[in-house]
Every structure is written in C-alpha cells, then in structure tokens.
Image: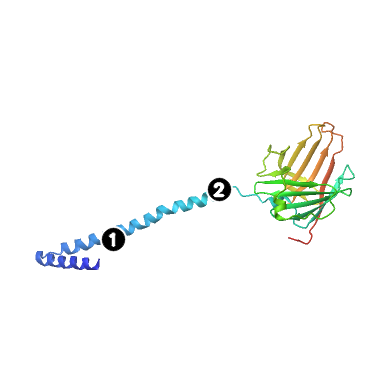
Amino acid sequence: MKYWLGLGGLALTLTVAGCGTEDAVTEEPEEGAAQEETEQDQAPEAATEEEPAEGTSGDSHEGGQAAVDPYDYFLEDGSTARFEGYGNEFAEFTLKTDYMEANHVATYEDNGGTVVLKVFRLHDDRIELVKQEGEFYDEYEASFEELEALDVISTYLEFPIEEGQEIGDATVIETGTSLETPYENFDDVFVLESVSEEDGSINRNYFVEGYGEVKREFRANADDPDEMAITSTLASIELGEKTK
C-alpha cells in the first residue's frame, strides 16, 4: 500500500510541475482523506448493528419469571417445629425435617400417638409425595437409587401458585392473605382446600414461602358455623444441628 502511494505521489508531482497550478495538489489528498474518514465512519456502524442482538438476549432473560425454590416450602434441615393443637388430643404435634439425597426431604410428624413418615421429591415446578408410612419410629435411610425408585403418591404443591389452581384433589382458594400464629404473624399466605366427597368434611392447609405449612384446619361439617374446627398451628421452631 505504501508503494502505491509512492507512485501516486510521484505522478502527482509531475502533474504539478507540468501544469504549474496548486489546485491539483490540494484536491487529491482531500479525496484520499475523505475516503479514509468514510471507512472509519462505516466501521463503528457495523459494530453497532451487532449490539442490539446481545441486548435483546439480556432483556428476554430478565423478563422471565423467577424460578421457585421448592426447599422454601420446608423448614431448615435438622429443625423441629411444634404445632399447637385445638379441638382434638392429636392436633398438637412436632414436625422434624431431614434433607436427604437426590432432592428428597423427609418429615417425621409425632402427635404423641404415632409418628408418620413422609418423603417428598422436589422439582423446579412441583413437589411430590413419594412415601408415607405411619408407626415409623426409626430414622428413614435410603440410597440415591432407592429414593429415585419411589413411586409418586400425589402432588403436594405445584408452582407457580395461583388462586383457583387445582393441585391434586385440592384447590387454592386464597393467595396473599394474612395469618396470625403463636409463632409469628404472616403475610402472603396461600390456602389449599380439599372437600371430601363422602361426608363433605373440609381440610384447609396454610402455606408460607420460607416456612412451608404453618397451619391445618379440619371441619367435619362446613354448614355448621358453631362447630369447633380442629386446628394445628405453628407455635415454635427449634433449629437442630444440620447433618447434610
């Protein structure tokens, strides 16, 4: 390229010498400079055209709905919660939480008469009940393969939670409601309700993100306003030493 410019410069000098004018000297360099400026102006435009694609990708990612952490619907690993009960001698119970392998969580519910083991399998969009056994007084142990082999019994929760949503045989009847408990007053509570086809009795379960189930309510006759409901409500949480 430098070699070409050298020849061009030589030809230009000869032309100037032959014509004896200064106009040709000034016009030629200006044309070359204008060409270089045009090339420089075009280069940023090409780079600018590629930027929106990257920006669009970021915008679509930000616009997506935040994923739900299914562990937020269980108490911390190794914790034991006490539920205060009314209306029945077995309404009061303790609930121990144990995190297992392969995204499984076990709970031990002790109401003084029996201990009920429940094992849940956690997915990004749902929680499934995969094992339930009463009169279980030992610690449940299972390998990764054994946990994965457990069959689904029912869907416990399904995300996102919306009012009117059906989850198994229950329906989300309220979202964003408030609830007073002996442990804490909660906001943004959602309520699952299931009605028995046999006798018309009603079960309601109250959930809070970050805690899980914080209250249960049973009514044998929903049409009788004077009937006392059987309730179990979160009263205290004791954090144990984590084993996982």
Question: Can you say which quadrant of the picture contains the C terminus?
Answer: bottom right
Image coords of residue 60 (percent x, y): 52, 48
Residue 88, image quadrant: top right
Name the residue located 33 percent from the left edge and 57 percent from the top edge.
Answer: 41
- Tell me, yes or no, if residue 209 can be seen here: no
Q: Is residue 51 left or right of residue 85?
A: left
Front residue of 156/185: it is 156
Q: Earlier in the sequence, mark 2 or mark 1?
A: 1
Assess disc 2: are there few (<14), some (14-19) or many (≥20) residues with their C-alpha within 10 Å of its C-alpha.
few
Name the residue located 74 percent from the left edge and 40 percent from the top edge.
Answer: 192
Residue 220, image quadrant: top right
Task: Name the residue carrying label 1.
Answer: 36
- Tell me, yes or no, if residue 42 can be seen here: yes
Image coords of residue 30 (percent x, y): 23, 61
**Secondary structure category for the residue under label 1:** helix
Front residue of 175/194: it is 194
**Secondary structure category for the residue under label 2:** helix
Q: CA distance from mark 2 to mark 1?
A: 43 Å
Image coords of residue 243 (percent x, y): 76, 61
Q: Is residue 36 above or below residue 216?
A: below
Three-letter amino acid code at the position of disc 1? Glu
Assess disc 1: are there few (<14), some (14-19) or many (≥20) residues with their C-alpha within 10 Å of its C-alpha.
few
Three-letter amino acid code at the position of disc 2? Gly
Question: Can you say which quadrant of the picture contains the N terminus?
Answer: bottom left
Image coords of residue 94 (percent x, y): 83, 51
Q: Is residue 81 above or below residue 8?
A: above
Count how many numbered circles sit on residues in the image: 2
Q: Is residue 4 left or right of residue 52?
A: left
Question: Which dot marks residue 63?
Answer: 2
Q: Is residue 129 above or below residue 37?
A: above
Question: Which dot marks residue 186?
Answer: none
Q: Is residue 38 left or right of residue 92?
A: left
